[in-house]
Amino acid sequence: MSTNATEFAQQAQDQTLGSIRQSQRAVVDAVRAWANAVESAVPETPSLPFASELPSPQQIVHTSFDFAEQLLKAQRDFTENVLAAAAPVIDKSQPAASQSPES
């Protein structure tokens, strides 16, 4: 990918991530405001006999995202290995870097 295309892609990714983070902050703020508003209206629930054996929501999120990270890394490694295996063909299909298009 050319430098301009790479820079454009990076800027698009940065803008997308920035928008996502801004939206996420707004959602977290809204959930916090809602939780503070309804906290006193929610009754205490009786505990279940096996509740201590269940993972907490934080533990579920942590283990799920750990797995997702491992899966994404495995997919990246696989894709890089496929590209390396196909390199002889890919390299032949790419225009030589030293040649410039004629106008």
Image: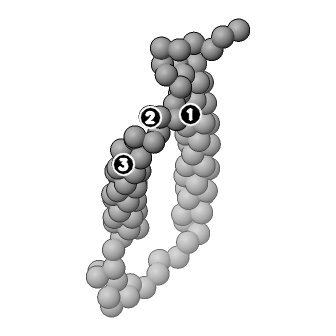
Which colour style is shown? one colour
Residue 28 image offset from top left, x and y in percent: 55, 49
- Residue at the outermost left position: 53
- Residue at the outermost bottom position: 49
- The residue pinned by badge 2 equals 91
Separation of marks 1 and 3 at Cα, in angstroms = 28 Å
Element carrying mark 3:
helix
Residue 77 image offset from top left, x and y in percent: 34, 51
Residue 41 image offset from top left, x and y in percent: 59, 69
Nearest to N terminus: mark 1 or mark 2:
1
The answer to whether 32 is drawn above or below residue 15 in the figure is below
The answer to whether 99 is drawn above or below residue 14 in the figure is above
The numbered mark at residue 13 is 1
Q: Which of 87/37 is in front? A: 87
Residue at 59% x, 41% y is 20
Separation of marks 3 and 2 at Cα, in angstroms = 11 Å
Element carrying mark 1:
helix
